Amino acid sequence: MSQLSNHHAFVTGSTGGIGLEIAKALYAAGASVVLHGRRTDGQDLLEARTQHSLPAAVPVVLGDLTEPMPQGPLQVAEEALRLSPDIDLLVCNAGTFIDQPFLEMDFRTFDRTMKLNVYSQYVLIQYFARRWVQRGIRGRILLIGSINGRLAEPTHVAYDTSKGAIDAMTRSLCVALAPHGIRVNGMAPGLVVTPLTAPALQNPRARKWMELHTPNGAVPGADACQGAAVFLLSDAAEHIHGQMLLVDGGMSAWQQPDPPDEWMNAN
């Protein structure tokens, strides 16, 4: 049921991490795919394709989604359409993560986080939605949020705020675009292993702590997000609109896990 043949996808932030895993899954499900990234090293881009189940011919758009605004994301969108004029699936995955105490955070850090994680999504979605409405295309949009859109952390104020905005944007865009035949949903991963999270998870005690806070006890790779992305963009999800699907091993459902006995009994 979750097949995407005859569909054409553009996935932002897809030369690594969750975005690359989603792009791989969409390609495997039959869609053509355009990748996007900021990296300029041709070898990195080649490896992102040929070493991860994507042919070298898969096109890549290189461009900054934050500067200038809104011209940056508009240029990226135009280049994606030049490479694949029939794009009807848009995955807004590109984002940044800042771990910094609020009292030490400067406005520039907060502003850049919001530009990439929120403003660029707005610009891209409006650009594609206008095109789809004009051409009668029943497009599908997937915004990548985070469990941090609902569960806060003290040193992640900028990130948490941006992902909370994505949560709300998913609902608002649903009611704005569903009458035009455009379906909007979101996916909110919990903690998964990516280039951004891997350094913190190298500490065995830190990883154990995260596993304890997840009911299924897992901190998986980014490929854990593949199935949900394909499903939400597929015909099987035709009547699903405005939902943020949490792919988090149950973390968001658990108020507070019990610590292990050896921790409680330690001197």
Image (cartoon, rainbow, N blue to C red):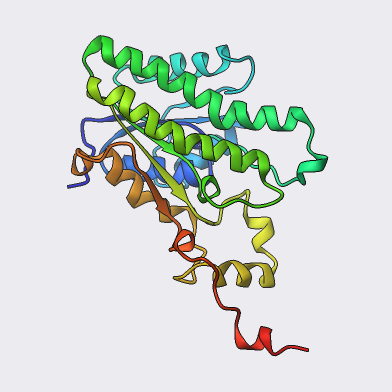
Outermost residue, front direction?
A: 255
Residue at the location (71% across, 47% down)? 99
Residue in the foreground of this view, choosing between 50 and 31:
31
Residue 44 placement: quadrant: top right
Q: Is residue 106 visible?
A: yes
Q: Is residue 264 above or below residue 28?
A: below
Image check: 256 left or right of 56?
Answer: right
Write the residue at 32% across / 40% down.
27
Q: In the rendered image, which quarter is residue 266 located in?
A: bottom right
x 60%, y 83%: residue: 260
Q: Is residue 193 above or below residue 13?
A: below
Residue 142 placement (x, y as % from top left): 38, 36
In the rendered structure, the answer to whether residue 114 lies left or right of residue 219 reads right
Total count of labels: 0
Query: As drawn, is 29 to the left or to the right of 196?
Result: left
The image quadrant that residue 24 belongs to is top left
Quarter that holds the C terminus: bottom right
Residue 131's x, y, as percent? 33, 13
| Position of residue 219 measured from the top left corner of the image (x, y, whole percent) | 52, 64
